Amino acid sequence: MDLRSELLKSIWYGFTALDLEKSGKVSKSQLKVLSHNLCTVLCIPHDPVALEEHFRDDDDGPVSSQGYMPYLNKYILDKVVEGSFIKENVDELCWTLTAKKNYQTDKTSSTVLPEKDAFRLWCLFNFLSEDKYPLVMVPDEVEYLLKKVCMAMSIEFNYVELEDFFSQDSVQQSGITVWIFLEMMNSGKITRGIEKSIISMAIEEVYREIVGDVLKEGYLWKKGQLRRNWKERWFTLRPSNLSYYTGEDRKDCQGNISLDGNCCVEVLPDRDGKRCMFCLKTLSKTYEMSASDTKQRQEWTTAIQTAIRLHVEGKKSLHKDLKLKRREQREQREKRRQAKEEELQRLRALQEERERKLAELDLLKEAQKQAQALLEQDEQRRRQQHEQLQRALEIQLREAEEARVSMQAEMALKEEEAERQRKRIQELEEMQKRLEEALQQEIKARLDEEAFRYAQAGLLAEEEEKMKALMSLQEEQEEYILKTQREKQELKQEMEVKSRALDEAQRQLEEVRANRHRVDQDVVAAQRKLRQASTNVKHWNVQMNRLMRPIGPGEKRPSLGSSYSSFQIPTQRDPGLRLRRRSGSEDQDEESKENVDNRAECDLEKRHSHASNGDMDIP
């Protein structure tokens, strides 16, 4: 039984404990909590969304144990590393879940086991139960477990109480489940009159031996490696190692001796005031120990040799090996029992066959007597028939002689008829030869006719292909005609669109001509205004030049009336005069520039009008 099977047994109880309705299904939220707790106690990382992703295609309903098993194997059990977690924590988690639902006891009763003892018995039951679900334990394993507990308590095992327990209808129908087993232990039938402390110690001892793989434990004297002094230590032997502690509470571990195929145990003579000595030799060290008596030394040496043998054989647990051997023995006993039943059935069948054959023999004897009487009657009847047949044969012989003579005459006639038939057959054979020759000729003619038909079929197929090609050409021609008609229609529509566009362009051309005429009139008016403005500018320039002429010394100011009496003409050296002349020339330049700009704008408008008209401008 591997680690996965052991874990699945405990997890099965946890899963069934969550199935409150006993429908075989558990909600996803409960499975999430169970999976998280399992990952915690198994010391593996937990993926919270793996369950939802695994059951994404399912509905939101509950999940059965068969549906949860793939997720459990893939995301939890496949990641478990042996030795990285404490299996007892997993068992305690599953026991806590299942005990709340299934383990209901009367706390006031004096025979009820403590919770810790019930948990250890539950673990022992799981270890010894069969690898089938729902988990049950066969009666032999129950008897083995109870014997171990009674031996640990140093009491005699009560077979009568166990037989009464096995004879119950519920046990025979559904098997021995863990709850029935715990109910029997709580009833006090096995542990009647024994103190609870003794029962607890016995259950713990059996638990550590079977589940904890402790082959033996107890006090021994050990000789130190450095000081070479003797100290009493509590030793615990497992298949892989021998550990020793300061006390039986196993809190302070003083050392650990690894066991392998290179280790051996030897008995030593008494020395240094110690008796019942033996040593354990490894590749690196030799450990000397002393037991309390010869019996204890023998038990320790045998247990250590057993541990070394298990390690060499690659077995991790003695009781797992013993369980497999007991199962094989049960299977062999079952096979022998079945063989005995088959042998008994065969013997019964042989006895019945013998009785049947004896009855048949009696019937045969009676039938033989009847047959003898009938035989005598038949013999008498045969004699009479023989005499009658003899007389009839004589008559038939005479008739046969007469028939032979008549037959000879008939044979002569038949020989003549046969000769005629022979000749007829020869004629028929000749006729058959001629018919065969005619048949060959007919076959040849039919072959020629068949070849001609094949040639004719080829011509017909070729003609059919040509007809198909002609039909395809005709279809292409019709498609081309339809395409040409569609293109003609589209061209007609396009010409109508262009005609409408031409009419629109003619209308726009008329509008442009009217605009051009108005623009020409505006240009003429602008030119007229320009010429008038130019004349005014020239006049004012003359006036300004006349007014700006300098007056020499001694000249009199001309009298221009009352309006010019106070006017003083500045000299050429007057900077104000230069500024006025410069400003006047600048004004003239600006006016000439404005005239040029106006003309350029007019020309530009004309060019724009011509450009907008394009080829539609008719001179």
Image (cartoon, grey):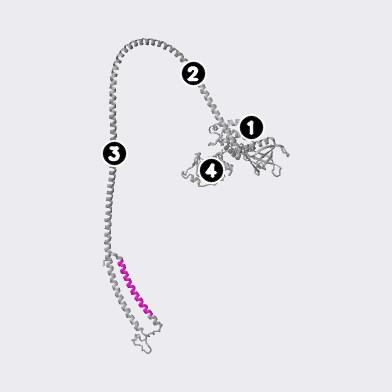
Q: State the residue position of label 3.
A: 455
N-terminal-most mark, 3 or 1: 1
- C-alpha gap between disc 4 and disc 3: 76 Å
Range of residues picked out in magenta? 582-611
Quadrant of the image occupied by residue 163: top right
Quadrant holding the N terminus: top right
**Neighbour tally class for label 4: few under 14, some 14-19, many 20 plus, Cα within 10 Å:** few
Is 225 situated above or below 594?
Answer: above
Amino acid under disc 2: Ala
Q: In terms of secondary structure, where does tag 3 sit?
A: helix
Whether residue 527 is visible here, answered yes or no, is yes
Q: Nearer the viewer, mark 4 or mark 1?
A: 4
- C-alpha gap between disc 4 and disc 1: 45 Å
Q: In terms of secondary structure, where does tag 1 sit?
A: loop
Instruction: Name the residue rendered at 29%, 65% in the picture.
Output: 614
Q: In terms of secondary structure, where does tag 2 sit?
A: helix
Amino acid under disc 1: Glu
Q: State the residue position of label 1.
A: 156
The answer to whether residue 95 is left or right of residue 399 is right
**Neighbour tally class for label 1: few under 14, some 14-19, many 20 plus, Cα within 10 Å:** few
Q: Main secondary structure of the magenta part?
A: helix
- C-alpha gap between disc 2 and disc 4: 69 Å
x, y percentage for residue 245? 66, 42
